[in-house]
Image (tube, rainbow, N blue to C red):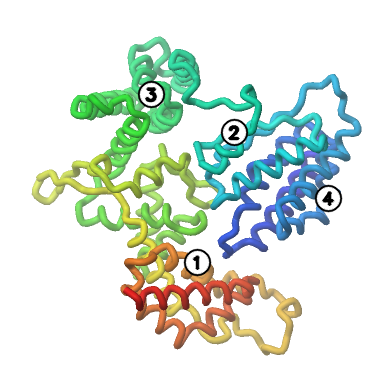
Amino acid sequence: MKDGLQLAWNGVELLLKKAEDSLAGTPFQVPVGIVNTLIELYNLAHHSHVYAESLHAASGAFDSVNKPLSNQMNDLLVGPWQKSVKNYSPDLPPYLIVIDALDEIQGKAGAEFLRKLLLTIQSGHLQGLKFLVTSRPDPELAKLCASFPPDSVCRLQDVSQEQADRDIMTYLHHALPVFQNKLELKELGRKANGLFIYASTAVRYISSGTPGEQQDQMRQLLNSTNNTEMSEVSNSFDPRTLIDNLYHQILSEAFVQVQKNHVEARLKLLYTILCTEERISASVAAGLCNATNVRDMEERADDLIKKLHAVLYVKDDKVFWYHASFPDFIFAQGQSSKICLTDFNNSSNYIKDMSCDAASHHALLAKCCFDIMQRELQFNICNLPSSFFEDTKIPNLQTCIKEKISGVLQYACQHWAQHIMKAIPKEHKNILDKIEKFLEIHVLFWMEAMNLLQLSKQCHIMLQQVIECITKAREF
């Protein structure tokens, strides 16, 4: 079995590397998300040695990440599974593959993926596998699910309150053993009111410290939500209000010890982490936010992520959020995003709105991308001996690219156009000068860098987007 697992892991690495290389810098990142979510190759191979070998043998088909979704399904799932199922006993229970948060795949691709999966299942090529798909009520997915048999769809709103409460209490007893048989645990379960995202976020908020610190965190959380609910009795059991109140408390705790003149810098880091077009490291976030003292900003980013551990986490050196409701909370401008902080210079309290105007911040990120490219791009950035040599013939080119094209410069080169598009329409005039200066001076250096990053095909698309942006901006 160990050999099979190693084979599967080699396949996973090869697949994701090819997907990352072919899709980096494009707005179409769906296949990577689907591959990560659907196949769970390593876990499936853990139970099926034959599947592990079949997947590894299919490594030549991993180029299908550049092909339509039906090709990906056939090459990466159906083909290897069909080879392994020949030795599968019908008496064995099926493997269960969980596809979580299908609504978070960009655009309408979640519905397209589910449609392709259904067609594949109906063809009879995935016998021995079962799929559990979860999603928020996305209109396209809901429309597709309307055709399902009634017993194959479970809507959370149809689950009884009593059942949801019992499930949450079971989870809380397991996740917070410090509070076994204590009233605080029952009170937290009551606060959750059947909302699992509230319970799981609260657990991460409470469970990070020592038993004594957990007691303090539990007390602070229960006291703060009690106070909030006293002022909002009519909405206290609305799911949106419940989770917003919890995020309000988490943000308050994360910023309570921050000096007033440092709050804006940390908010800028948080907004940048949430607004970037791909998940980034703390160092890239710092580079996008501050060109003069990146190291200091990176330390602030690390501290911010640590203090927001209940909602943010780091994986493979990149920052993720646990649930899409947290960015929703930050981008929704309203009363719930305002928190009370203390100015330590004069011991006075002040109200700070923690919400983010997404369009404005995308415009800011576009400006930052232009500044970074203007500062770091140059002719023949890798000091290549001649333009007549093919890149594949130049020794140690990839090492040179990593040294000369920093992570933050790579991000700026790949995504400045997307940030401009998301700043439509009100912020375009504010960055028009940056765009025009870039097109006059640095556009050729940028194209050279994109070619070195093997993303030259994206240049035409991005420039076309910029032309459209300039045209629209001049109409306002």
Q: Nearer the viewer, residue 145 or 126?
A: 145
Sequence-wise first label, 3 or 2? 2
Residue found at the far right of this picture: 86
Asked whether the beta carbons under mark 3 and mark 2 sit within 8 Å of each other, the answer is no
Q: Is residue 5 above or below residue 160?
A: below
Q: Looking at the rendering, which quadrant does residue 222 occupy?
A: top left
In this rendering, position of residue 149 left or right of residue 80: left
Q: Nearer the viewer, residue 205 or 110?
A: 110
Q: Is residue 109 above or below residue 138?
A: below
Secondary structure beneath label 1: helix
The span from disc 1 to disc 2 (Cα, nearest Å) is 37 Å
Q: Nearer the viewer, mark 4 or mark 2?
A: 2
Sequence-wise first label, 1 or 4? 4
In this rendering, position of residue 148 left or right of residue 360: right
Q: Please state which amino acid type lies under the numbered disc 2.
A: Ala
The span from disc 3 to disc 2 (Cα, nearest Å) is 29 Å
Q: Please state which amino acid type lies under the numbered disc 4.
A: Ala
Asked whether the beta carbons under mark 1 and mark 2 sit within 8 Å of each other, the answer is no
The residue indicated by pointer 1 is: 415
Q: Please state which amino acid type lies under the numbered disc 1.
A: His
Residue in the image at 72% along x and 48% along y: 12
Work out which quarter of the rendered image holds the C terminus and state it.
Answer: bottom left
The residue indicated by pointer 3 is: 192
The percent position of residue 133, horizontal first and vertical second, equals 61, 34
Asked whether the beta carbons under mark 4 and mark 2 sit within 8 Å of each other, the answer is no
The residue indicated by pointer 4 is: 58
The residue indicated by pointer 2 is: 146
Q: Is residue 217 above or below residue 333?
A: above
In this rendering, position of residue 391 left or right of residue 296: right
Q: Please state which amino acid type lies under the numbered disc 3.
A: Ala
